[in-house]
Amino acid sequence: MQITEPNVTAETAKNLGLTAEEFEKIKGIMGRTPNFTELSIYSVMWSEHCSYKNSITLLKTLPREGERLLVEAGEENAGLVDIGDNLGCAFKIESHNHPSAIEPYQGAATGVGGIHRDIFTMGARPIASLNSLRFGNIDRKHTQHLVKGVVSGIGDYGNCFGVPVVGGEVYFNDCYNQNILVNAMSVGIVKAGETCSAIADGPGNPVLIVGSRTGKDGIHGATFASADLTEDSAEDLPAVQVGDPFQEKLLLEASLEAIQTGAVVGMQDMGAAGITCSTSEMSAKSGTGMIIHLDKVPTRQANMKPFEILLSESQERMLIVAKKGEEHLLFDVFEKWDLQCEEIGVVTDTGRLEYFENGEKIADVDAHSLVLGGGAPIYKRDSAVPKYLEKVNAFDIEKVEQPTDFIATAKKVFESPNIASKRWVYEQYDSMVRTNSMSTNQPSDAALVRVKGTEKALAVTTDCNSAYVYADPYKGAMIAVSEAARNITCSGGVPVAITNCLNFGNPYNPEVYYQFENAIKGMGDACRKFNTPVTGGNVSFYNQSVIDKVVEPVYPTPTIGMLGILDDHKNQMTLGFKAEGDLIFLLGEAQNDISSSEYLRVVHDVHHSPTPHFDLDEEFELQQKIQKLIVEKLVASVHDISDGGLFVNLVESAMVANHGFEINTDLNFRKDAYLFGEGQSRVVVTVKPWNEMTFLHFMEKHNIAHTQLGKVFGSKINIDDEDYGNVADWKHTFDTTLENKLENS
């Protein structure tokens, strides 16, 4: 049967997200005008989501090498780090923003499924999941709808799949009213020698597809993720995939067992761009080609067009290159797990991807020309200093009046949805499955996960205060890396490496590109300082809303997913106050600084101010000393100061076991800055009274700025001899603020 396709013109290319110049380049590569299927292949592979065409030049400036890295950054589906004991840790974070904004439940669920597949295709078993979520104004009904859908999608998929959610973050800001951010991170463990690569070596080796049948969900999903989100984007709902966590669980177990047979040459998850992406990337990496018979691909719907089969992003599917003559071993494994596995093609030595339908060749493209580093275009866009920075630089703290009622002010800060407990969110996640989590009853600044069979633990976190990055992209990105490292350090770990999820607006907007290039520079400088190379990640551009023809980019949000290691899990440090009489110390310099603080936003309605005080060298030195304090058992609790400032830090530590405290502020500083300012490089520790002299000697010896604030006392909060009430009442407010907004909506 002759397959008929639409005529291909420059307008066709434009409708598929390609520029006129890119269309001409494709014709030059092919030596002819591509047919519609071939043009569709290029459109998804050259989309921003797959090709990184507007970001790769800058990404290559990030530190990508380290003594612990087992694979080069970007070379595999996820980063892989040596954690000792003949074990590796695979970890990665990715976005699923646009799908979640349109269909929050499935968008978030399939984001979780996709990131886990990136881990277990490498032979690693996922043991922990984290996420980083950004929503609009929580008082809007639409935001409440999105929050409920996203949280349910993450919870339902993860709980059914059997991997605990051990950490994450949730922020609210009007800039995310339409374009929310859903970033999902997975962490897995693999034994040395049991990893698997996404390669297609060996001409003559069979190509297999395994897992769910291919349907029409997710077609042009990569293109959808590489375009602006508008009021009409709901019409693109077919671009959102549908997930099945039970199928994914079977696929996980079967894939790990299949790798053990030794019959797997290479394996890759079918994520963005589906069969197109996996066949092209695996072939290009090996310098080989493939012949693929699309009529052999199991489908859910009859009469699917070739381009639909190629571009479908149906979930829970893998592409496997098997050793010729040993494929029966893989068929046996997948049959055991009740998974459909079909041979759909063969590896060739031509370097070309030849796709057939019922014997008719419907597409013939050069594999190398499709991928990053091959023929995919690379751009560096124009950059311009954002005009809003004039408002940021004009901020004057002297024009901000101090509160007359600090108790009422503290309550207003504490009730901010960005400060209040996210209990309503995390209680829908299973954090205990697999019994590896160490942070459930004794919280730490980072999530701690045991590595079974060893004395080790992993410390993992996701961090980014996007308001800081908005105020100063360079310094804000440095703070994001440094806060992630600080959370790991304060938990007893040593920062090792990062993955990142870079969420920005349209790269063709010079002000957005300025944010991006400066955030990359800041991230790189901080990673070099902490010796935490970038193992890979995800760039998500076009995160902005178009409402009444007004473009509103989201705050630049370079989310950092960081991995740390505790060689001995007994060095775990927690943030809660331990006992009455323990002494409370502030480490680091206090600052007369309220810039970009939650206090400044919610109390004074000021949204343009510089980043808070930050010095990279100062931050690094403090963290080095905190690591020693913890190992030498000189501190009973450690908690870093971040969102909400010192007051929120102290109450969070008090609430763990209902221990009150009494402190005095420093009269040399504005009281609002002392209590609510978010100056960086500050940590609160508690010290046992009998350890005080040893602790102070350590402080003096290592020249660490420190101030005794007060002590743990009773069950009330007392600041400057003023009674702020019971810890239990603050905890009730903390736990119910967000819950009340969502449950009563």
Image (tube, rainbow, N blue to C red):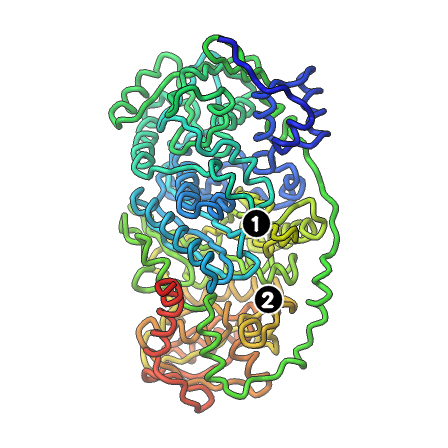
Q: Residue furthest left?
A: 336
Q: Amino acid at mark 2?
A: Glu
Q: CA distance from mark 2 to mark 1?
A: 28 Å
Task: Find disc 2 in the rendering and name its residue.
Answer: 618
Task: Tell whether 683 sits left or right of 315.
Answer: right
Q: Estimate how packed mark 2 is, as few (under 14), some (14 to 19) or many (20 or more) residues with alpha carbons within 10 Å.
A: some
Place of residue 162 in the rendered image (x, y in percent of width and height, measured from the top left): 30, 44
Place of residue 139 in the rendered image (x, y in percent of width and height, measured from the top left): 46, 65
Instruction: Return the disc, 2 or 1, that comes first in the chain's sequence.
Output: 1
In the rendered view, tell whether residue 424 sits above or below residue 121.
below
Q: Amino acid at mark 1?
A: Asn
* Rendered residue at 27%/51% (across/down): 435
In the rendered view, tell whether residue 420 sits above or below residue 461.
below
* Res 412 seen here: yes
* Rendered residue at 35%/52% (across/down): 449
Q: Secondary structure at mark 2?
A: helix
**Closest to the observer: 728 or 451?**
728
Q: Secondary structure at mark 1?
A: strand
Place of residue 370 in the rendered image (x, y in percent of width and height, measured from the top left): 60, 26
* Res 488 seen here: no
